[in-house]
Image (cartoon, rainbow, N blue to C red):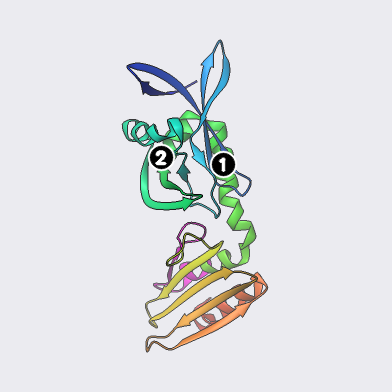
């Protein structure tokens, strides 16, 4: 098995990286030592805080030996800080984005399962909306969107939203904000003059249909 080396008081400890997922699909990484072809648990590298993380991103375990994980990740170039921080129970956690290719090499089976699970989690939940967004990106000239779902924090808060998409149509100058907060989903359309129209939905398919209707004259 391929490993990374943890340096401790001049000693090099080979660690086996095992990739898995937390229940909602977030990246989970545990470290093991190997002895006579048997893996012994060594430490958990990541923690699972509330909200969905962006692909290949996770908050590091900062406790005990975990305080030395940033140095390990920097030396091995396995991950880099995203700049996101979150406080929970008086402990500050820092988010890191891992190198997908390196994780794949270290644990091919585990990473493949994680990638498939993570990709499908949001896709299945809001499938029709994402299909609509992809269709608009393909056929409406200049239309583009940025997906902040599960990783961008709300202003003055550490909370994230399960659905948060910001889109723009340069041709008309309109901007679109799509969020799911609480029991309802919201589509906010901002016109070039600053006026806004807000629509609420309880069914995901209704939001997708409404979004496509706004561009019906420009779709094939």
Residue 48: quadrant of the picture: top right
Other-residue count near label 1 (Cα within 10 Å), few / some / many at <14 / 14–19 / ≥20: many
80 shown above or below 210? above
Q: Which residues are magenta?
A: 134-153
Residue 151 counted in the magenta span: yes
181 shown above or below 71? below
User: Toward the viewer: 6 or 54?
Assistant: 6
The image position of residue 193, as x and y in percent, is: 37, 89
137 shown above or below 38? below
**Label whose residue precedes the other's in the sequence (1 or 2):** 2
Q: Which mark is residue 97?
A: none
The image position of residue 157, as x and y in percent, is: 46, 63
Other-residue count near label 2 (Cα within 10 Å), few / some / many at <14 / 14–19 / ≥20: some
Residue drawn 39% across the image and 72% down it: 142
The CA distance from mark 1 to mark 2 is 14 Å
The residue lying furthest to the right in this view is 203
Question: What is the secondary structure assignment of the residue under circle 2?
Answer: loop
Question: What is the secondary structure assignment of the residue under circle 1?
Answer: helix
User: Toward the viewer: 125 or 209?
Assistant: 125
The image position of residue 150, as x and y in percent, is: 52, 58
Residue drawn 33% across the image and 33% down it: 71
Report the residue marked by disc 2.
Answer: 99
Report the residue marked by disc 1.
Answer: 114
Residue drawn 61% across the image and 75% down it: 207
Residue 194: quadrant of the picture: bottom left
Residue 102 counted in the magenta span: no
The image position of residue 107, as x and y in percent, is: 51, 30
Q: Is residue 30 left or right of residue 65?
A: right
């Amino acid at each position: 098995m391929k490993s990374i080396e943890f340096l401790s008081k001049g000693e090099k400890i080979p660690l086996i990286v095992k990739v898995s997922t937390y229940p909602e699909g977030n990246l989970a990484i545990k470290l093991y030592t190997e002895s006579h072809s048997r893996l012994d648990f060594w430490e958990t590298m990541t923690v699972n805080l509330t909200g969905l993380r962006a692909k290949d991103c996770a908050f590091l375990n900062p406790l005990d030996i975990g305080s030395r994980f940033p140095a390990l990740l920097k030396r091995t170039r396995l991950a880099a800080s995203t700049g996101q921080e979150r406080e929970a129970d008086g402990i500050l956690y820092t988010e890191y984005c891992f190198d997908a290719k390196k994780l794949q090499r270290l644990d091919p089976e585990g990473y493949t399962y994680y990638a498939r699970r993570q990709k499908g989690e949001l896709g299945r939940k809001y499938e029709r909306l994402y299909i609509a967004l992809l269709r608009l990106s393909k056929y409406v000239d200049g239309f583009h969107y940025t997906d902040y779902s599960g990783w961008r924090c709300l202003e003055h808060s550490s909370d994230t939203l399960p659905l948060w998409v910001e889109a723009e149509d340069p041709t008309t100058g309109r901007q679109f904000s799509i969020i799911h907060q609480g029991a309802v989903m919201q589509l906010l359309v901002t016109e070039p003059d600053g006026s806004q129209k807000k629509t609420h939905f309880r069914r995901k398919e209704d939001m997708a249909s409404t979004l496509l209707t706004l561009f019906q004259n420009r779709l094939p």
